Image: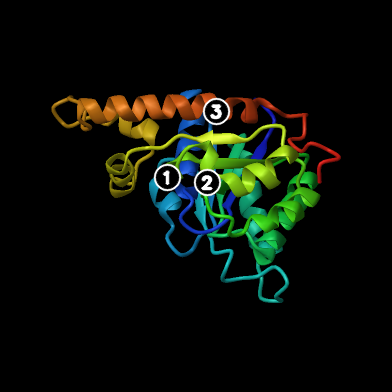
Amino acid sequence: MSAKTVWMVTGNKGGVGKSLFCLALASAFEMRGVQFAIFDGDGRTGDVYSTFRRKAPARQGDFRALRPESHLSDLDLVYETQLQQLLAGSPHLIVNAPDGADMVLKKWFDLTLRHTEAGNINFRLVYLMSDRPDGLDMLPQLAESFQFLYPVRNLHFGPQKVFSAFNEQYQPGFKVVIDFPELRAEEVRMLFDLQTSPAEALRLRRASGTYAIPVLQRARLHAWQRRVNESVWDMIDNLEMPNLEFGKW
């Protein structure tokens, strides 16, 4: 677990649960006693940055505001420096990308990969999906660039079978597909309203010393986070085996 890794979290469209996945991934690291840092590149909401500021090394940017092909882009001058600073004290950096992977965002992914390769840092592209086919046509282009590409079916949208467009056309191209368990809407709202991660929410206490979260909510949140941990540990621990099935693309 000593190798440094950048986790770029993106998705096939808006509303696929990227921010919640970032919180859950960070909680998985925290519950294992592993340090992490945050870069929130989604300038529209900044939910991930708001959750972790003053609690972990965190920075905020806006991938949509400055494009890598523009002479106004500060990627090499600021973004790369921020990545290096965040990784200096943390083995893992979680980067939250804006909604919907497209060719503009792929330029950011490509340049981030270039910077990580130059520093001998692992790069993982995590691709969250809804049950809709929107945006899935980006997967072959992403697979051309990123050997450690991990698709994630967000089971909030239904069981595995509802992801039929992905399952039939793209799943054979991956060794591992992650199923992100559904979390009840009231727990999701609680996390974002309180600007807290699951690991932190589970230990929040009132001034009296009692837990701040009701027993049933804590039990559901704990069970959900345990399922998340079980689904992501193989991905986290895999440092050598690409996730693409070669010959299938």
Helix, strand or loop for disc 2: strand
- In the displayed structure, 77 sits above or below 169; it is below
> CA separation, marks 2 and 1?
7 Å
At 34% from the left and 30% from the top, the residue drawn is: 221
Mark 3 / mark 1, whichever is N-terminal:
1
Mark 2 / mark 1, whichever is N-terminal:
2
> CA separation, marks 3 and 2?
21 Å
Q: Position of residue 104 (x, y in %)?
A: 67, 66
User: In the displayed structure, does residue 50 sit left or right of residue 142?
Assistant: left
Q: The residue under label 1 is which amino acid type? A: Phe
Q: The residue under label 2 is which amino acid type? A: Ile
Dividing the image into 4 quarters, which one contains the N terminus?
Answer: top right
At 56% from the left and 71% from the top, the residue drawn is: 65
User: In the displayed structure, does residue 189 sit left or right of residue 34?
Assistant: left
Mark toward the viewer: 3 or 2? 3
Q: Position of residue 196 (x, y in %)?
A: 35, 41
Residue 191: which quarter of the image?
top left
Cβ–Cβ under 8 Å for marks 3 and 2: no
Cβ–Cβ under 8 Å for marks 2 and 1: yes
Q: Position of residue 20 (x, y in %)?
A: 44, 44
Q: Which mark is residue 52?
A: 1
Outermost left residue: 208
At 28% from the left and 28% from the top, the residue drawn is: 218
Helix, strand or loop for disc 3: helix
Local packing at callout 2 (Cα closer than 10 Å; few below 14, some 14-19, many 20+) is many
Helix, strand or loop for disc 1: helix
Q: The residue under label 3 is which amino acid type? A: Ser
Q: Which mark is residue 38?
A: 2
Q: Which residue is mark 3?
A: 231
- In the displayed structure, 114 sits above or below 177; it is below
User: In the displayed structure, does residue 225 sit left or right of residue 194?
Assistant: right
